[in-house]
Amino acid sequence: MANILLEAPVFSVEAAFHAAEFGVDRLELCSDFTEGGTTPSLGMFQTLKSQIDIPIFVMIRPRGGNFVYTAREIEVMVRDIKIFLSEGADGFVFGVQKTNGEVDLEKCSRLLNMAGDKSCTFHRAFDNTPNLEKSLEDIISLGFHRILTSGGHNTVSEGMANLLQLIEKAQDRIIIMPGGGSKPEHVHSLFQKVPLQEIHASCKKIITTTEVYRNESLQISANPKTQVDIDPEIIKQFKTAFNRV
């Protein structure tokens, strides 16, 4: 049995509670599923932190879109880290790029300094950089603890070759955490070739909302009839895969 950590991104308080209940080892707490995650509300974090006992890493991303941030946006990110840090966040997830796509060392360093000794993940902005090997070395030099990546492609399946190379190059200098369309069958493919420590998987299922009335001529939300929740069966499949490698 391999000692592999399963992290799941969660976008609502109910999904977060379900993830903890069903056996996820760590939460990446976010808002806005359609944008791939933005900074969650403090109230949601406080509620979860007071009632569940697995680590909660907080997404620090002031908006959707790209990862090139203005000085004002960085100030917001710094303040968010300070606030969540004071409330007991176990770690943070963020990433900043320059306009040319490279890792913004100066701005990332400022955010890391605010996070102190808390574990920090450079998220999939990494996959948008022009040279993954250079970005790997830059992120290691900054002092991040891990990189969340699909190997520069949309999914882990497509980026598998790059993922294997990145894990080999990283050695024990930083954790390479595969994420982006991760499936239980990827565990065997990865673990048989490289030392896999952590994997990031949404383990999601789409549920229908319980409301009875809806004004069908009114469009307020992009997906008013559905919500993203956690599927216990997928978590079980990941845990089974961990036991087999």
Image: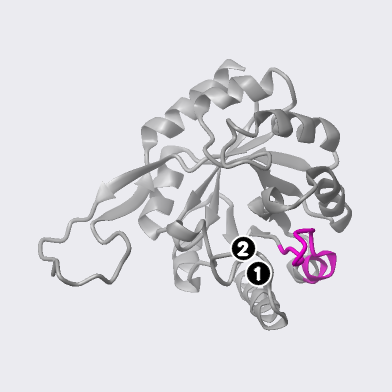
The residue sitting at 82% across, 67% down in the picture is 109
**Relative height, residue 97 to residue 159 (above, below):** below
> Is residue 97 magenta-colored?
yes
Split into 4 quadrants, where in the image is the N terminus? Answer: top right
The residue sitting at 67% across, 75% down in the picture is 82
Split into 4 quadrants, where in the image is the C terminus? Answer: top right
Magenta segment: 96-110
* In the foreground, 132 or 15: 132
* In the foreground, 207 or 156: 156
Residue 146 on image: x %, y % = 73, 47
| CB under 8 Å between discs 2 and 1 | yes
Q: Main secondary structure of the magenta part?
A: loop
Residue 118 on image: x %, y % = 73, 59
Q: What colour scheme governs how the chains and residues are painted in the rendered image of this protein?
A: one colour
Three-letter amino acid code at the position of disc 2: Ala
Q: Which residue is mark 1?
A: 85
Three-letter amino acid code at the position of disc 1: Leu
Mark 2 neighbour density, 10 Å: few (under 14) some (14–19) many (20 or more): many
